[in-house]
Structures are given as C-alpha cells and as structure tokens.
Amino acid sequence: MKQTAEPDGGLAPRTVTEPGPIRPFGSREQHLGALFEAVLTRGPLSRRDAARLTGLSAASVTKLVKPMISHGYLIENVREAGVPGRPQIPLQVDAGRHHAVGIKLMDGEIVGVVADLHAEVQSAHRMKYRDTSPEGVVSAIEEMTRILLERSPVDRARLLGIGVGLGGHINANTGVVVKSPFLGWRDVPLRKLLVERMNLPVVIENDVNTLAVAEQWFGAGSSFPSFALVTIGVGVGCALVLENQLWRGVSGAAGEFGHMVVDPDGPECHCGKRGCLEAVVGDTAIAATMSAAVGRRFTKVSQVVAQAHAGDPDARQVFTQAGVALGRAIAALLNLLNPPLVILSGEGMTASDLFIDALRAELDRDAFSSTATDCTVLVRPLPDETWARGAAATMLREGVLRSLSKLSDQVPA
C-alpha cells in the first residue's frame, strides 16, 4: 500500500420551475461534457491533447469546441511556440463564465462560499442556526446566500444556482432528503422548498459526494478516473467516483460505508443495527469506548485524543482498535472495487497519527492479492470551507453540463 443578486445583495429575479428527475445525457451532450471537464481539470489544453485525453477524434473536438468558444465557456490562449508540427492553440475554461453558491449544512452551523468555475472562492461565511425544521433550515440557507452575495463581487446574472451538501441519505435526482439523522428528517423535499423560496436553481447532495466532486475536479482525485473518498468524524461516509462518474446508486444511498457491519455484537448504531463501522469508530464511539475502558466519562473525542497524545495506554488502545476496524472495512472496499486511490478525510483525520499504523497493518492483512499495494491511501484533512466549495462545484457541474447540452444542436453533425 502506498501512502502518500442584485447590486444591493438581493437575489437576481428570474423564474425557476422545480426540476423533475435528472435525465441522462445523449452521446453528443456527453462528449461536450467530457471535453469541458478535460479542459477544466487539465487545462490549458490544445485540441490535440484534449482529443487524446477524451478519446474523441480531432475532428470531433474541433466541432465541439466551436460553440463552447462562441458562448464564452472556453477561451483560446496564445499559440504554443517551439513545438513540432502545426502550432497549437491552448484552450482554457473562462473561470468567470459562471458562479455558484455552495453550502455545507452541519448540526447547528452552516458554512457557505461563492465560487467560480475553477471553484476558487470569491466570498465565504459561517453562521449558526437553531431551528432544524424544514422551514427553519430553508430560512437559514436563504440568509446565508444573501450574506454571501452581498460580500461577493460576482455578476448576479452569471450565478448558476445553489449547491447544498448535508449528511444522510440524499436522493440527488429528486432533491429529497430521504433520511438525515442530525436533522431528524425523513422524506423532506428540500430542493423544492428552496427553489420556491429563492427562485434559483438548486442541487441537493450528500456532503461526502460534494467533497468528492471537488477532489475530482481540482483535488487529489483529478488525475484518477476512479477513486474512493472516506470521511471519518461524527459519522463515517464514503463517496465513489468510478470511471469519471460519481456513483450515487439507484436512490442516492451508495457509499453508506459507515453502516457496514464490522462487529455483529458491537454497540448499537443510530440506524438500529449493531456493530456498524460508524458505531465503532465515529467520534461518539471513541468517547464511549474510552469512558468504558477507564470508568470515567469522556464526552468529546478531543479529550481522548489529548490523553492518547499524552501517552495514556488506554486512549492509545482505543485508537488502535478503531484503526483495525477501519482497515478491515477499507480492505473490503479494495477487494470489491480495486481502486487506485483512497482519500481519507474528515475531522477525524486530525488524529490519524494515532490509528494509521493499525489501519495499514489490517489493510495489508485483509486485502486480496495486490489490491492494497495497487492503491494509494492518502490522508487529506480538509476544512469545512472545502466541503462548501465542493457543494458549489456540484452545482457548477450540474448547471454547466445542462447549459452545454443546450449547445448540442448548434454543433455541426
């Protein structure tokens, strides 16, 4: 295993109808999207290199590029000099062509950003909220969006919409929060509620999936067609990118890694089962295990981390056990998918030094054949703002690909 609005800040008036389920793209639209994403993530790119990366013919790339340039999605740089053959004109994405608001919704707190097409943050803000009813959360997101746009210099006419990431079972196709334990929600049509309130396009997504989109576009996953992102903290999550596509599953429940049973006789999980990975290695589980081990109550994982770093053998053993459970679960993931990269992130990574050796040893022990040595496991702690940036990138991706699909009729056959 390798480790390594308006001018006054108001929302721009527009008419937005509640979208139905996301429909699949046709092949022409898929080619436009693939070409755009290649230039976005690897650019500036010549047409020749874009053809090589996408597998499209040089003639197809030439045809597809024309409407993207004419509509301002791509711009041409100065010709390359000193290269063999005909001089190439590098293409790059116009970062200012569109912007989006990204929201990470947490328990009692919202983090928001405005980002451009390169997912560069133009403004950011954090705020508390108390009302966890659907009405209360919609109001909090509306307030956050207004604050962000008041502080941002972006052209409101270029605002694609709002991306919202939150933990739980989210059906991104329908915009319904099927189940969110930290909000206590079931079957809440959050996208519909936000569109009706704010009159802007909205994408709702599991927050780990939004982080994976950011990593796929601009982060550690940008050089890999497939990878897994595992997050550890209050909960345990997973997102899967397979052959350059975010894999959501039939109803958005793919990647519920935290509810893989690793100990059938283990502690009860909030989902109702026993021995889920989250119930063994999540923050609450770490504190509870330490409390049971020493007969003294620990309420925060940070207290256990401090004890472990001070050399407490009980605290160190708690993290060793967590590392073993994580390694066992990740080995199952490697055996199933054989990915070239697994990114470990989340607030729990601040304690990675306490469990990574146990994780590595268990992974090497349980993974089949060469799946562990074939995979790079990357420890990558990321701040909350990066998760919000990922939510913005998710909106940008959805909105831009929809916009590009409207250009397909203008591409010569």
Image (cartoon, helix red, strand yellow):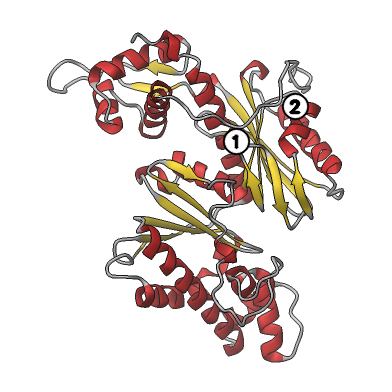
Q: Which residue is depicted at the point 30% across and 31% down? A: 54
Q: Position of residue 337 (x, y in %)?
A: 38, 57
User: Residue 145: image x %, image y %?
Assistant: 74, 32
For residue 59, the mark is none
Task: Give the label, 2 or 1, closer to the camera.
Answer: 1
The residue at which mark 1 appears reads as: 392
Helix, strand or loop for disc 2 = helix
Could you tell me how far apart the alpha carbons at marks 2 and 1 are, in whole angstroms?
17 Å
Residue 375 or 250: which is nearer the viewer? 250
Residue 141 found in image quarter = top right
Q: Between disc 2 and disc 1, whose residue precedes?
A: 2
Q: Which mark is residue 150?
A: 2
Q: Residue at x 54, y 52 (%)?
A: 254
Residue drawn where x is 31% and y is 16% of the image:
78
Residue 109's place in the image compared with 121, above or below, is below
Disc 2 vs disc 1: Cβ atoms closer than 8 Å? no
Q: Say which element carries label 1.
A: helix
Name the amino acid, label 2.
Answer: Glu
Q: Is residue 171 above or below residue 348?
A: above
> Residue 411: horizontal and vertical position, in percent?
38, 11
